[in-house]
Amino acid sequence: MSLASYIFRILGVFCLWLAVIPVSDAIIIDTFQTAGLLSSSTAVGTPHTLHIASNGALGGGRSFRAEKTGAGIGVSRIEVADGALGYTQGAHAGIASVTWDGDTDPDSVKYNGLGGVDLTQDGAIAFNLGLVFFDYPFNQSIQIVLRAYDASASNGTKFSEVALTLNQYFDGPGVFTIDLPFSLFATAGAGSVPAPVGQFFSTITTVGSGGPVDVRNIGALVLTFNGTSNGKAPDAIITPFSTNGRCDGVPNQAGRILDDCSVCLNDSNAGKGRDRCGVCFFGPTGYSYVANKVIDACGVCPSDSRYSFSDGMLDSCGTCLSGPPSYKYVDNTAVCDATKNNCRFVPPTKQIRAFEEQLVKKANILTNRFIADVQRFLDRKCPGSVEKADALVTTAYLAIKARAQDVFGKGVQVCGTSCVTVSFAKDVAALTPFFRVLERQVAATAQRVQSCYRTLGITRRPLTGGGRAGQTISGVRRDLEKLVKDCQKTKVCPKN
């Protein structure tokens, strides 16, 4: 039957797949939603090409190339229909490819056409190819070849190519995800990846004369169905083609899938993640955003010349002088309070300062645990990047430190000779989102180190990381709960 007919027949399989298999977020290379069909010439060695514009494809479109490379009946054909990419050829040798290079010319590859897309920006560590069907005719295999070009070499000499041999019949149920780890593209040589029924597909990696591709700087991608050694009329269908990161969608024209605050562009909070001081709010996609308070006690941003951390611009009665920045500051000393009760600010007591020290200490424990695991991650040259996690941890730690100083360092207003009772419980509880950021990153990084150790065949656990990360997190959480109770009622007197 024709490829189009087969694709229509498997729509029921797609529905079943969507119902029973969770669909993970990912950078999408192509949604395969804009249909197109290209057949080679019946003459051997005469390729045909076609470009199809598509908003659902990386770079704004895809280019087809199909060629009949050996004598026999039929043509080589490549087709997008109903959200899938299919290849079929007659009883002859053939080959076809799809190129994503941001260019409309289907007869050549623009090696730096995508401008340097970072495929790791949302935490991805692999390409995903969804295998829907391969008929493995007369036990004859074909290769699926993925070549990735580095945008730094406009002549195409810096690339990595992974050739995967399909040598197993597959027709569902559902879709089998073939993972091609980015690490496969780093070094030339033979390897393998999991295949259906507990088996493996063999792989061969080739690199260009200019070196391997940097997946953080993709200039073009070419996916090829190589049936030059198969004259038995093979057919194959794949969907989807993506990475395994946390964001769902096609990168924008600038190659970005994240906004400047590391929020996925398809999220409703994208582009809204900064406070008025220009500091990113916290929380990855799907989480509520909590304002990151770095302003001083009078609402002034650190970049302003009037910034006075942590008391702010206060007069002697503890009243903020008119602001925030760009407003004229007026001293209200003569007003004090309505009763002329000699109100003044009492500097932080030792007990109050101890609350600040405890908060920063707990945040520092989690941060140091994270740093230790990052160092192990780097020492072992584990695949992937921890740059995003490092940025989140650094920002969270600095925010906790700044907030603690802001809450406990500004003193307490006392009027007359009476003592006052104050509570910092809500202020401490408000730091919970920042500690959650630290906890998530510590736990995730420890898990990545352990996974890397297992891959490298290292059986011992890191002395201060890995399995003990959970103990550290639970211990810090218990200490914070105690701190909230301790600072619920604090007495401050005029003579303190």
Image: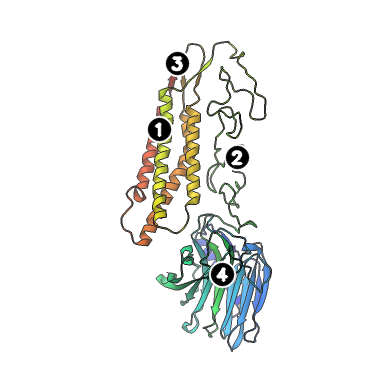
**Is residue 135 visible to the viewer in this orientation of the structure?**
yes
Q: Nearer the viewer, mark 3 or mark 4?
A: 4
- Quadrant of the rendered image containing residue 249: bottom right
Which callout, 1 or 2, points at the residue further toward the start of the chain?
2
Q: Label 3, on which residue? A: 493
Report how far apart the C-alphas of labels 3 and 4 lie in the structure: 74 Å
Q: Earlier in the sequence, mark 4 or mark 2?
A: 4
Residue that numbered label 4 is attached to = 157
Residue under label 1: 358
Query: What residue is shown at x 37% (from left), y 46% (from top)?
Result: 470
CA separation in Å, label 4 and label 2: 41 Å
Q: Is residue 31 above or below residue 7?
A: above
- Whole-percent x and y of residue 403? 50, 33
Estimate how packed mark 3 is, as few (under 14), some (14 to 19) or many (20 or more) residues with alpha carbons within 10 Å: some
Residue corresponding to mark 2: 278
Task: Give the image location of residue 51, x and y in percent.
Answer: 68, 71
The quadrant in which the N terminus is found is bottom right
Query: For residue 12, which quarter of the picture?
Result: bottom right
Q: Tags 3 and 4 in contact by the CB under 8 Å rule? A: no
Q: Is residue 441 above or below residue 431?
A: below
Q: Residue at x 47, y 21 (%)?
A: 347
